[in-house]
Image (cartoon, rainbow, N blue to C red):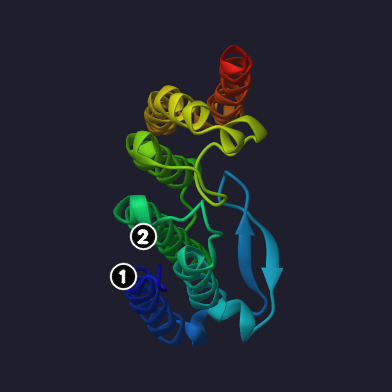
Amino acid sequence: MKVNRKIVWTAAVLALVATALSIAFYQRLPDPVPTHFNMEGTPNGFTAKPFGAFILPFLIAAVGLVLSVLPAISPRGYTLESFRRVFEIVSITIISVLFILGVVALLQALGWRPPLNRVLLPLLGVILIVVGNFMGKLRRNFFIGIRTPWTLADEEVWFRTHRFGGPLFVIAGVVLMAGAFFDAGNALLLPVIIIAALIPVVYSYVVYRRLQP
């Protein structure tokens, strides 16, 4: 499987847009540039210019590069070819969410201070919903999905675990999105992520033990 051009083009376009935004607002950005914020939108991490002003296009390009080459370096027997379209959708979703978060961070550096839980949690919810919706179409690989020793060891365990975990991810995404608009997102974030991640892991072990002779 060759380097995925759709992912490359998506990352390239969004990185160029992010670069244009950074150039347009460069003179108005403080030095150092706020690059990390708490859930209330208050800066708690800074990066000096010029890198701080252009950290977003750099991250988009780096993430896009990694995602685009994963199909080409996947080991034999665990290739991504059988679910190429799904991998593209998930990868483009991740890059797009990163771009949106970066634009919000740039606006915050310029003085806009919205509660991040109203932005971050819905975007995390979108990723969970997208991944969960396509989880049943994933096949064994080392890069995306519920990768436990038991799912990677057995194709049937992988299949059952992802059919089981997909709806959990979708529910978790919906809960995060709803919680953000009811000011309950901060309290829900950690429990929802733990439940969505832990239950399928335990389930994969149980299924593996049941299928072993």
Q: Nearer the viewer, residue 212 or 70?
A: 212
Q: Are marks 1 and 2 in contact (CB under 8 Å)?
A: yes
Q: Which residue is mark 2?
A: 92
- Residue at 45%, 69% (x, y): give it: 68
Image position of 10 with respect to 81: above or below: below
The secondary element bearing badge 2 is classed as helix
- Residue type at mark 2 is Ile
Task: From the top left corner, tell me how far across and down residue 49 is, in percent.
Answer: 64, 84
**Image height check: is 6 above or below 173?**
below
Q: Residue 5, can we see it?
A: yes
| Residue 25: mark | none
From the viewer's side, name the closer residue of 69 and 194. 69
Q: Is residue 110 visible?
A: no
Image quarter where the N terminus lies is bottom left
Q: In the image, 30: left or right of 3?
A: right
In the picture provided, is 29 more to the left or to the right than 149?
Answer: left
The numbered dot on residue 6 is 1
Foreground label between 1 and 2:
1
* The quadrant where residue 58 appears: bottom right
